[in-house]
Image (tube, grey):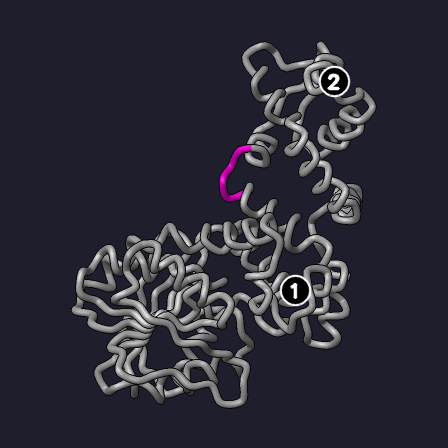
Amino acid sequence: MSNQSIKAIDAIQEAQKIAFAPFVFQAVVALRKLGVFQVIFDHRRKGGITLEALSEKLGISTYGIGVLLEIAESSSIVNRNETDHYEITTTGYFLAFNETVNVNINFTNEVCYKGLFHLDEAIKTGKPEGLKELGDWKTIYEGLSQLSPLQQKSWFDFDHHYSDDIFSEAIHVLFQKERKHIFDIGANTGKFTMKCCQNNASVNITMIDLPGQLNKALKNVKDAGFENRVKGHEIDWLSDNPQIPTGADTIWMSQFLDCFSKEEIYKVLKTCVDSMDEDAELIIVETFTDRQKFDNAKFVLEATSIYFTALANGNSKMYKATEFMDIASAAGLDLQEDLAIGEYHTMFTFNKK
């Protein structure tokens, strides 16, 4: 056993917290859904609120609310003061009202929770064994358009939360050069494509994605009035010989390649290199684990890797920037620019070697 400074009594306390972490998580979900957090917060200037008053206000038994508040108090999520009034702690406030935490909780609960039970199977087989809890697909990407409305909302809210905030800054950088034709690979709902069209009146874009997702993106683009400058190209990157068109001066991939194994990333990049003209650029935007300023951001990325393992595809993860550099070089790309974007992201710009 390694020599660590933590005392045994503290270590076992941390171990017990991990052992019962799912109980605490589901208690938090229930406190949010039942409105308990909101009522306690609303009474913050009144010295908090009693269990009995909470029960009466919400129409829920004191037993039901009580068992939730007991574990929440032990977990420093709420505090019971000397007059037996409950107050929300700073941790509780973030669990109830912080946008990023809210997105993460919903994604975990609605998309990942049941599937994570199969993590050990996924580790053994290299396949997303937990995906069967959502549907009968080889990868989650095949089934995105078939998830329930709540699951779709939670998945896309999670995906967009960690990408949309940097689009404006990324597009500002992108259009410092003239861009005539962009391939938006992994177009998702078409948000980036539409923002490009809004920003530049002459650019043409080809969205490249799986058929189900591409059809949704094309509908969104049409509804936004940009169908004359946007077209789609269906692709399955896991097929034996995926092909993309030629003629783009820019190939764009934002939080796309982390959905693949290293071997598959090489395959995607090599396919793109084969389609590129000598002066074309390939741009990758990712959240790399070795580029994060704060430990909690790195922790979120590492947790996301577990989602990829158990539910998404069984063989991808959040990578280090150095890993992407090596794969890109092997695929025939030469790094031209390495730029920090927003709080979490890195933008790599490559040319063909």
Task: Quadrant for residue 130, please give it.
Answer: bottom right
Stretch in magenta: 97-101
Look at the image and say whether residue 157 sits in the magenta stretch: no
Whether residue 21 is situated above or below residue 127 in the rendered picture: above
Task: Give how far apart the Cα atoms at labels 1 and 2 are.
Answer: 38 Å
Kind of residue at badge 2: Ser
Disc on the earlier residue, 1 or 2? 2
Q: Nearer the viewer, residue 307 or 227?
A: 227
Picture residue at 28% right of the left edge, 56% below the top: 225
Kind of residue at badge 1: Leu
Q: Secondary structure at mark 1?
A: helix
Q: Nearer the viewer, residue 289 or 102?
A: 102
Picture residue at 74% right of the left edge, 27% below the top: 69
Q: Which mark is residue 311?
A: 1
Residue 279, given in percent of the width and then of the height, sits at: 21, 82
Residue 289, given in percent of the width and then of the height, sits at: 50, 62
Q: Which mark is residue 55?
A: 2
Count the marks: how many?
Answer: 2
Residue 208, given in percent of the width and then of the height, sits at: 40, 73
10 Å crowding of disc 2: few (<14), some (14-19), many (20+): some
